[in-house]
Image: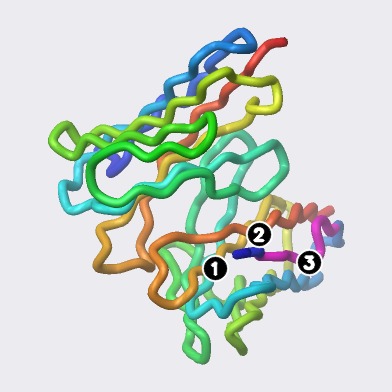
């Protein structure tokens, strides 16, 4: 079983839709959770970073962590064609910051 | 802040030659840098982790004599692909972590094509 599971998609939505991207994980020691956005042929860009459980909002993006269920989500409101990219979740246990665990990425396509 | 650059952004070389890729943290000091490889439509594969002034730690299955990593300063790490072969063609991405920070900042990547 992989440490982090993420549906590869592709996920196709119309412009303006609310998008929900999710990851599940198996290691209850994970405390730091990140979402990256990667455009084609580019390096990943850090979008959201959260610690432990709870929600964090930044503009149209909301990151949610449910440690009891070992489940994290990224919500995108009013999705735009420019949001079309691959979204990677990542996490670490906070003890060894040199060890990060990445999901395989979900490809999102927002249709105009 | 937290900008990481890579150079070159793309490179084409002949089989058997060596290629050096530079990774720089532009506005912070990176105590740790990571090198990843990414094949089309696949996720990131960690190759090695390097701390400034120390030898890199390679992931299982990554040939350390083929992929030479040098982290000579707190803002620069280099990856040299020695005696490159077509199967080494890939997208190489570096990332950097500042001391005490709990996340990584990625560079834009370098696309290597070996003919």
Check the residue under mark 2 and report the chain it is in.
B
Q: CA distance from mark 1 to mark 2?
A: 8 Å
Mark 2: give few (<14), some (14-19) or many (20+) Cα within 10 Å: many
Q: CA distance from mark 3 to mark 2?
A: 9 Å
Residue B107: give its label.
Answer: 2
Check the residue under mark 3 and report the chain it is in.
B
Would residue A22 be counted in the magenta stretch?
Answer: no
Identify the main secondary structure in magenta: strand
**Nearest to N terminus: mark 1 or mark 3:** 3
- Which color mode does the image show? rainbow
Q: Residue at image x 38%, y 74%?
A: B100
Label 1: which residue? B96
Check the residue under mark 1 and report the chain it is in.
B
Residue closer to the observer: A40 or B40: A40
Residue B7: give its label.
Answer: 3
Residue closer to the observer: B8 or A53: A53
Secondary structure beneath disc 1? strand
Q: Quadrant of the C terminus of chain A?
A: top right
Q: Is residue B73 above or below residue A88?
A: below
Q: Residue at image x 63%, y 80%?
A: B75
Q: Which residues are magenta?
A: B4-11
- Is residue B79 visible to the viewer in this orientation of the structure? no
Contact? badges 1 and 2 (CB < 8 Å): yes
Q: CA distance from mark 1 to mark 3?
A: 15 Å
Q: Quadrant of residue B21?
A: bottom right
Q: Residue A22: image x %, image y %?
A: 37, 28
């Amino acid at each position: 079983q992989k440490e982090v599971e993420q549906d590869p998609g592709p996920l196709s939505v119309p412009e303006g839709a609310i998008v929900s991207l999710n990851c599940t994980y198996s290691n209850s020691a994970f405390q730091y959770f990140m979402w990256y956005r990667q455009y084609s042929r580019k390096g990943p860009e850090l979008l959201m970073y959260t610690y432990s459980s709870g929600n964090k909002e930044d503009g149209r993006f909301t990151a949610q962590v449910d440690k009891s269920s070992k489940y994290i989500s990224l919500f995108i409101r009013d999705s735009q064609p420019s949001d079309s990219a691959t979204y990677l979740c990542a996490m670490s246990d906070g003890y060894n910051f040199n060890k990060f665990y990445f999901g395989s990425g979900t490809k999102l396509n927002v249709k105009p | 802040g937290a900008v990481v650059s890579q150079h070159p952004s793309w490179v084409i070389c002949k089989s058997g030659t060596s290629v050096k890729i530079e990774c720089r943290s532009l506005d912070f000091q990176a105590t740790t840098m990571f090198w990843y490889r990414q094949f089309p439509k696949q996720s990131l594969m960690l190759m090695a982790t390097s701390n400034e002034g120390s030898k890199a730690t390679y992931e299982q299955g990554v040939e350390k004599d083929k992929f030479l990593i040098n982290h000579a300063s707190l803002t620069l790490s280099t990856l040299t692909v020695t005696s490159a072969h077509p199967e080494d063609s890939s997208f190489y991405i570096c990332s950097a972590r500042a001391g005490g920070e709990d996340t990584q900042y990625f560079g834009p990547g370098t696309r290597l094509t070996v003919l």
